[in-house]
């Protein structure tokens, strides 16, 4: 599978926070495999989430957990010093 392709088999397994998880899968697939850091505020802006940041962080955590569960991402971590999230793309 090309490095920038969405794995449809894994996409069909997404069951929690489906819309956000699928958006994040597409975003992650547009980047090379490996470690990535991204601003939580940027993710909130880019995915068009209108609720308060606290609710977004909760939803984001659930969506990232789901992507980790189906094997799209590895070792997801929120970085507290900077409001960022770090993950490893499988």
Image: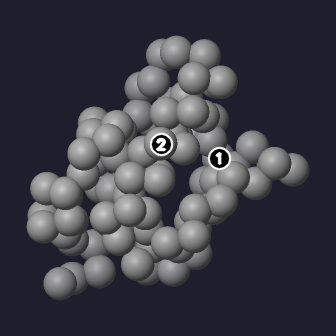
Looking at the rendering, which quadrant does residue 28 occupy? Answer: bottom left
Q: Secondary structure at mark 1?
A: strand
Q: Residue at x 57, y 33 (%)?
A: 58
Q: Residue at x 76, y 54 (%)?
A: 79
The mark found on residue 39 in the picture is 1
The mark found on residue 55 in the picture is none
Crowd tier of the residue under label 1, counting other residues whose Cα lies within 10 Å: few below 14, some 14–19, many 20 or above: some
How many discs mark residues in the rendered view?
2
**Whether residue 28 is visible:** no
Residue under label 2: 62
> Which is more N-terminal, label 2 or label 1?
1
Q: Is residue 61 left or right of residue 22?
A: right
Crowd tier of the residue under label 2, counting other residues whose Cα lies within 10 Å: few below 14, some 14–19, many 20 or above: some
Q: Position of residue 88 (x, y in %)?
A: 53, 73
- Looking at the rendered image, the disc whose residue lies closer to the viewer, 1 or 2, is 2
Q: What colour scheme was applied to this rendering of the protein?
A: one colour
Q: Secondary structure at mark 2?
A: helix
Looking at the rendering, which quadrant does residue 40 occupy? Answer: top right
* Quadrant containing the C terminus in the rendered view: bottom left
Q: Residue at x 47, y 53 (%)?
A: 65
Q: Is residue 25 left or right of residue 73?
A: left
Q: Residue at x 54, y 44 (%)?
A: 61
Q: Is residue 10 left or right of residue 25?
A: left
Q: Position of residue 22 (x, y in %)?
A: 28, 47
**Whether residue 79 is visible:** yes
* Quadrant containing the N terminus in the rendered view: bottom left
- From this view, report whether residue 49 is shown above or below residue 1: above
Q: Position of residue 87 (x, y in %)?
A: 56, 65
Looking at the rendering, which quadrant does residue 9 occupy? Answer: bottom left
């Amino acid at each position: 599978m090309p490095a920038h392709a969405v794995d449809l088999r894994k996409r069909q397994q997404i069951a929690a926070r489906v819309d956000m998880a699928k958006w994040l899968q597409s975003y992650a697939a547009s980047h090379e495999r490996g470690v990535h850091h991204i601003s939580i505020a940027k993710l909130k802006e880019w995915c068009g989430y209108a609720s308060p940041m606290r609710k977004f962080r909760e939803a984001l955590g659930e969506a990232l957990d789901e992507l980790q569960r189906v094997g799209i991402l590895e070792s997801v971590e929120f970085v507290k010093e900077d409001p960022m999230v770090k993950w490893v793309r499988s």
